[in-house]
Image (spheres, helix red, strand yellow):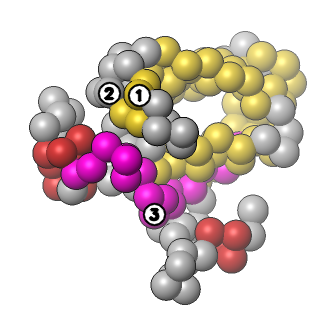
Amino acid sequence: VAPHAFITSDGENSIKNPGTIFAGFEGERFGSPTHVDNNCQASLSVQLAGEKRWWLWAPWEVADSNGSLVEAHSRHETVLWPGDMLLWAPGWFHATHILTGDSIAVVYYVGAPVYSKVGSSAWQHNPFGFAKCG
């Protein structure tokens, strides 16, 4: 993924690091036990090889891109194949399982506008220590 793919409206590059490579073998579970990344940026996982199942849990009630509310602690599941990308917001618990083939993925932290429909109160009144993100 080219860094210029994530340029913000003010011309700044929203990718906050050069990327972290995650590689593993078929059958392995990554992010186990289930965990949360303790930072204020969204995460973008780019699947380069292998097939990986993702589980994500909403940390608190949030609005989706259509303005509909997603219930707190609801579980969401998807499978990524080579060329697929997954973007998730700060505070989302997640875990993965490599289904077929050896897996290679690159994860970037990006300055995506998350929780904008919910407002800064989502950061200020959460139990996970993300008040610094508001």
Would residue 107 appear left or right of 80 to someone viewing this image? left
Q: What element carries label 2?
A: loop
Of the two numbered discs 1 and 3 in the rendering, the one whose residue sits closer to the viewer? 1
Residue at left 55%, top 19%?
Answer: 76
Of the two numbered discs 2 and 1 in the rendering, the one whose residue sits closer to the viewer? 1
Magenta residues span 105-120
Q: Name the residue under label 3.
A: 111
Amino acid bearing label 3: Gly
Can residue 93 be seen at all in this image of the molecule?
no
Q: Quadrant of residue 26?
A: top right
- Find the distance from the CA under tag 1 to the CA under tag 3: 22 Å
Of the two numbered discs 3 and 2 in the rendering, the one whose residue sits closer to the viewer? 2
**In the orientation shown, which residue stands out farthest toward the bottom?**
11
Query: Quick one: 31 or 58, which is closer to the camera?
Result: 58
Amino acid bearing label 1: Leu
Amino acid bearing label 2: Glu
Residue at left 68%, top 22%?
Answer: 78
Q: Residue 54 carries which label?
A: none
**Where does the image place residue 16, in percent across and percent down from the top left?**
48, 67
Q: Name the residue under label 1.
A: 69
Is 110 magenta? The answer is: yes
